[in-house]
Image (cartoon, rainbow, N blue to C red):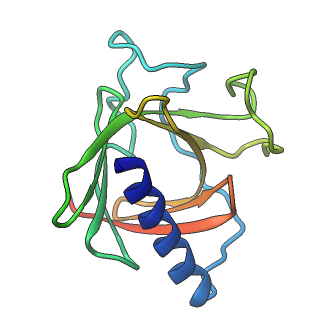
Amino acid sequence: MKHELIALAVLILALAALAVGALVMHTVPVSAPASTGTVASSSPMAGSPLVGVWQSTTDPNFTREFKADGTLVDAYAGQSPSEGQWFTFTKATAPATDITYPLETGATYIRVTDAENPPVVLDFKVVKLTSNSLELIYLGRGNILDFTRVR
């Protein structure tokens, strides 16, 4: 059920972003520690500019929190939040076993794995990251997600 709700939220966000023509095709490096796989407690994401709570600009009921310990919390107003894990990677540090799309040199990517059984893995390209703005492209479909920092 949580997976279906997250998928629905992602679809709504993507359709709204596409409707306003918000496609931006430049990359912004993220100065976060890269990971080669799972996030372990000995390799926290502290210091990553992604750490914090981000609210969707197209659906203010949806927030995504990137925690410094590699935990991710997706929340939609009125529903129980879902948790998972996240880490960043580049073309050079990508998980070698399951990347099915071309990666760009110099680009930063985020892998999100939810806590469902079996887990759902979602990969995003970071298009824009400032202290208050985050733009991601969901690599599975090309959907664009825009966020503003809440905290």
Hey, which residue is sitting farthest top in the picture? 42
Q: Pinpoint residue 92: horizontal percent, then vertical percent.
A: 74, 27
> For the point 44% across and 20% down, which residue is it?
39
Q: Residue at x 50, y 19 (%)?
A: 38
Q: Is residue 117 left or right of residue 88?
A: left
Q: Quadrant of the C terminus?
A: bottom left
137 shown above or below 123: below
- In the drawing, does residue 25 fall left or right of residue 108? right
Q: Is residue 69 above or below residue 129?
A: above
Q: Is residue 151 left or right of residue 31?
A: left
Q: Is residue 87 above or below residue 144?
A: above
Q: Position of residue 33 (x, y in %)?
A: 49, 27
In front here: 151 or 11? 11
- Does the image show residue 134? no
Q: Nearer the viewer, residue 147 or 133?
A: 147
Front residue of 35/18: it is 18
Residue 12 x %, y %? 47, 74
Q: Quadrant of residue 4?
A: bottom left
Residue furthest front as drawn: 1
Residue at 36 percent of width and 29 percent of height: 70
Furthest-left residue in this view: 78
Q: Nearer the viewer, residue 146 or 98?
A: 98
> Is residue 92 rendered to the left or right of residue 37?
right
